Each structure stands twice: as C-alpha cells, then as structure tokens.
C-alpha cells in the first residue's frame, strides 16, 4: 500500500472530484493521503475534510506566501485547529525566495510556527525553495524546538544540503518531478537514508509522467514510486513498504 504524504485536494481543480478521487484509492493501492494546509482557509478545510473521511489526515499551517498578511490571531487559530485528533503536523511552512515575498516576514512566520509545533509536540512540514542558507540558519538556531520531526516536502535541493541538514535527521519527500525527462535526482534520492524517504504528489501540481500536462491527484502516486524504485535499484514493493512505514512514523498515524 501507498500513502500520499502531501496533497491539496481542496484546490479548485480537484475539490469537486474528491469523492471520485477517493473512490479510486483502493484500485491504485492508496491507503491514505495527507491534506496539507497552506493558509487559514485551506487549514480549516483540511480539518473538515479529515473529519469527513477516514482515509484523510490533515496538517495546518501558513505557507511563506502569506507571511506579510499573517497575524498573531492566525497563529492562535492554528493552535486551536491543531487540537483535532486528525491533525498530524504543522505545515506547510517555510521559506520561498523564488518569488518576491518579504524575507524578514517569512522567517518571522516560520519561527512562530516552529515554536507552535514544539508546544503542540507536532512535526513540521517544510516548504523550501531557493532559501537553503537561511533555512539552515533557522534550523541551526531553533534545533532544540524541532524535536518532533521535520519533513522537507518535494525536496529539490542538493546532496550536499542533505549532509548539512543531517543534524536534524529530517525526512524527505519526492514527487512527480523525479519522473520528468532530464530530471537527474537519483543521486539525491540515494543520499537519503531509506528510513527517511516519503512519496508525495503535491496534487494538483507536478503531475508525473505519463500524465504530465494533466491535473495531478493521489492516484498517480504509483508512478512516482516506480521511478523511486528504479533510482534506488530496488523493487516497487520495497519502495511501497518503506515509504508506507516512514510516512506513518513521521505523522504518527497508527
């Protein structure tokens, strides 16, 4: 069985099709998916979706895109949302320097949410793009507050950064981009300890080959698993089993 560790089923491209998508999970060996919060609306929605469906769990958090608009009231509301038994992490939170978001505001919001996760004894799901040096600085300064697990979702960094983040022993999730033509991620995937590897779709984004160009959904996860197996030189069954166990361990799902 497989678990999609990171999906956005509430995106406007998927929300109307959620019942049909979930109905296909057994056919495609999907046991669970994690619905990821990225702003207050999607965080609230993720909790409601997880309450409605047994095979969905939720995270709540504020993506760096919203850093300039985030308030202390938002942090308190996330704290309340996270009391729900189906909430398994704070995320996705992080740093994104690819776009022109205020860097100081991003770091401030990230730190507030790291501290929130620590008080709630929850892991954090990290969005990281073009900000590796600053993320390393935050991780280093606040490592004592990241004791409950950290996942770098849709990891696009280097093998060297895996070495530099090793003091946190993080988990790494890989998505559809590893199936793209000319995408040479095998060396990076092999650099991650097998007990720290996860699969994700990041639906509706990053649709894997052979469906690239269409809207992504968790039922395409097996194509990512097949490519990871190829890159690791092990069987599909081994990848399915290890990523299944790793995802349940990280999110503490029984």
Image (cartoon, rainbow, N blue to C red):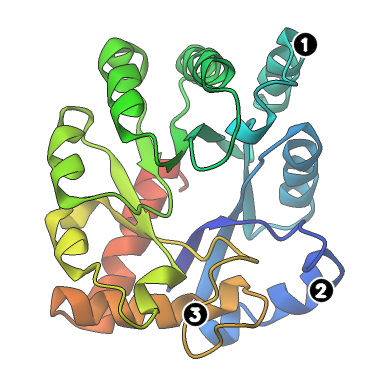
Q: Does residue 41 sit above or below 5 in this rendering?
A: above
Residue at mark 2 to residue at mark 1: CA–CA distance: 32 Å
Q: Position of residue 173 (x, y in %)?
A: 37, 55
Judged from the image, the secondary structure of the residue bearing numbered disc 3 is loop
Q: Position of residue 124 (x, y in %)?
A: 46, 32
- Return the x and y of residue 201 as percentages of the image width and height: 52, 66
The label shown at residue 253 is none
In this figure, which residue is indicated by the disc labeled 2?
17
Mark with earlier residue (1, 3): 3
Residue at position x 53%, y 73% in the image:
30
User: Residue 29 shows which numbered tag?
Assistant: 3
Q: CA distance from mark 1 to mark 3?
A: 40 Å
Residue in view at x 65 percent, y 27 percent: 82
Q: Nearer the viewer, residue 107 or 228?
A: 107
Circles 2 and 1: CB distance less than 8 Å? no
- Separation of residues labelled 2 and 3 (CA atoms): 19 Å
Spot occupied by residue 238 in the image (x, y as percentages of width and height): 23, 75
Q: Image height check: is 29 above or below 42?
A: below
Query: Position of 34 compared to 50: left or right?
Result: left
Q: Which residue is mark 1?
A: 73
Image quadrant assignment for residue 14? bottom right
Callout 3: 10 Å neighbours few (<14), some, many (20+)? Answer: some
């Amino acid at each position: 069985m497989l678990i999609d560790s990171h999906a956005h089923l509430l995106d406007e491209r998927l929300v109307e099709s959620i019942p049909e998508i979930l109905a296909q999970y057994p056919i495609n060996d999907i046991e669970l998916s994690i619905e990821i919060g990225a702003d207050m609306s999607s965080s609230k929605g993720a909790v409601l979706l997880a309450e409605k469906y047994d095979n969905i769990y939720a995270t709540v958090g504020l993506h760096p895109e919203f850093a300039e608009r985030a308030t202390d009231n938002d942090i308190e509301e996330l704290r309340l949302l996270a009391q729900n038994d189906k909430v398994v992490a704070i995320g996705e939170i992080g740093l994104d320097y690819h776009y022109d978001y205020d860097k100081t505001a991003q770091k401030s919001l990230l730190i507030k949410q790291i501290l929130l996760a620590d008080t709630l004894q929850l892991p954090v799901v990290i969005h990281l793009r073009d900000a590796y040096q600053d993320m390393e600085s935050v991780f280093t300064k606040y490592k004592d507050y990241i004791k409950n697990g950290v996942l770098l979702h849709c990891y696009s960094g280097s093998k060297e950064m895996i070495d530099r983040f090793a003091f946190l022993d993080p988990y790494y999730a890989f998505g559809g981009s590893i199936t793209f033509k000319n995408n040479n991620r095998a060396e990076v995937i092999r650099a991650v300890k097998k007990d720290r590897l996860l699969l994700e779709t990041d639906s509706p984004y990053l649709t894997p080959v052979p469906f690239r160009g269409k809207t992504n959904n968790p039922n395409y996860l097996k194509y990512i698993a097949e490519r990871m197996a190829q890159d690791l030189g092990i069987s599909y069954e081994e990848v399915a089993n290890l990523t299944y166990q790793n995802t349940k361990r990280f999110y503490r799902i029984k």
